[in-house]
Image (tube, rainbow, N blue to C red):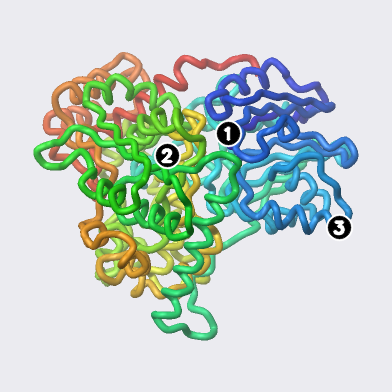
Amino acid sequence: MCGICGELRLDGAAPRLDAVRRMIQCLERRGPDHEGSYSDGPLAFGHRRLSVIDLSEHANQPMVDQELGLALVFNGTIYNFRELRSELRDLGYHFFSDGDSEVILKAWHAWGEACVEHLHGMFAFAVWDGRERQLFLARDRLGIKPLYYSQTHEGFRFASNTQALLAAGGVDVSIDPIALHNLFTLHAVVLAPRTILQGVRKLAPGHCLLLRSDGSRREWSYWSLDATRPEHPMEDDEWLDAIHAALRRAVQKRNDVADVPVGVLLSGGLDSSLLVALLAEAGVSDLRTFSVGFEDHPGEKGDEFEFSDQIVERYATRHRKYHIPNDEVLRRLPDAVEQMAEPMFGQDAVAFYLLGEQVSQEVKVVQSGQGADEVFGGYFWYPQMQADRDGPALERFARHYFDRDHEEFRHMVTPAYRGEDHSSEQIAHLLAHPQADTFMDAVLRMDVTTLIVDDPVKRVDNMTMAWGLEARVPFLDHELVELAARCPPELKLRQGGKYPLKAMARGLIPDAVIDRPKGYFPMPALKYVRGEFLHFMQDILESRACRERGLYSPAYVNMLLSAPEMHLTRLQGSKLWHLALLELWLQRNVDNCGLKEA
């Protein structure tokens, strides 16, 4: 796991090495073990390394293959790199390192644009072909690893986070109105390629980009998710057996492909508990687990230790449990926001940040349960949508998911941002995409391939990599996802959702963990806003910077401030926190960067 960046000049000039250097500095926390740079004509690369596979200097990056005329910067993990290495050796390639990075270089040379179809893992990478003078960029199928870019007539820059691009300078930091609508409608999801800033874009999951030094470019999708029933129908038991086998393989691969110990982020819920059970079942000894909790609120408990403790006891894991008081949460909140590549409303972003800090002192790699709810239908709104038969697909989805309807959005923002209902148009298009048998097939596919990328998955990457901690997500193994997408929604949603996982867990983890109501990484202080947290958010929204920015209607802000606990979204998020978070993110990440020289 690493931080990558680079620049390709499109105007015939040499790359701005000072700008690349600033980008590298912004990525230091993602890769504390090594720093490297490389330049060739119009191209410059930068890299920060977190050493997980092949810990030797031979695997340092940027990785250059002089014989093939190629250079690489890569962030992620390729779980089938040993099999690919053997296949490429049979084709006549020889290797100078023992890790997964060099496999990508050889794969590009052997298979060209089709190389990504051979890769099984999470990745964002760039390959410079010095002979053809072209830059190839790719992002994994489910967008687990980030890849942001900015482009002007002078050049193209890319990086693992927005902060690096802003540090390089020359970025248009005005607000993208369509992204703003997405942000406040879709729970901080901004659909690729947009971000909240006009001058920053992101490569969509499962996409490649080929850019030549003359400025010509081509972008395409190399993967899509089929949500139709297979040609030969399967019985329920067959589905359960196939899913169980695929998940076991996914968990095993994410433990075996590492030259350092791998832990588990144990929330106390079904998903992470099942990961511990499957690792123990596979014979992994000395399991390391980590849990975090916060102060209780009269309406919500701040930890799930009563459940995680049962898993620790059953499997005798080497466990660390952290309880973080509210004053510590409030003190560290601005730091966490500074690490967000984009604004993130999810309360657990701060939780993951504080947990990641502690866990990174003991291990470099963890497995985490993100993706299970989207892949197997675990959220409370899925049964609501399934039962709702009234109206077209968009209305059925929006009634149970949208944080704000368009009319409320118009009341929230100032006249300059009261445009069209962009989010509804985009969601309707995604739901209507072919290869989905039913409405729920379309919903789950859209969530897995689009919404999850910019919500829980992005949060986990940002908040763990802020401490040089690699998070692996076996529930988003693309082969498991492909299998689950073709499974009938009725089976996934049985017994309140995630039935295949519940069936698998029987006998492996306590029934109390399996049958408990669905939990969410609890941080009550950011949901039931009061006391010091209310004053904190009020200070942000009444600040001079916020008033001069002119995004929010003062009347709407005052309405939220007058009764913050009364204004929750359909997904039970604080609307006041949403407004304060975006403004704080802009103040901490954008306002101080200015428009530097390009």
355 left or right, relative to 58: left
- From this view, report whether residue 444 is shown above or below residue 463: below
Q: What crowding class fits label 1: few (fewer than 14 Cα within 10 Å), some (14-19), or many (20 or more)?
A: many
Q: Which of the numbered marks, if any, corresponds to residue 91?
A: 3
Q: Which mark is residue 459?
A: 2
Residue type at mark 2: give it. Answer: Arg
Report x, y in % for residue 477.
52, 57
- Locate the N terminus and report the quarter of the image it occupies: top right
* Left or right: 420 in relation to 510: right
The percent position of residue 16, horizontal first and vertical second, equals 73, 19
The CA span between labels 3 and 2 is 40 Å
Label annotation for residue 160: 1
Q: Nearer the viewer, residue 171 or 451?
A: 451
Q: Is residue 91 left or right of residue 120?
A: right
Q: Secondary structure at mark 2?
A: helix
Say which residue appears at 23% left-offset and 44% top-offset: 304
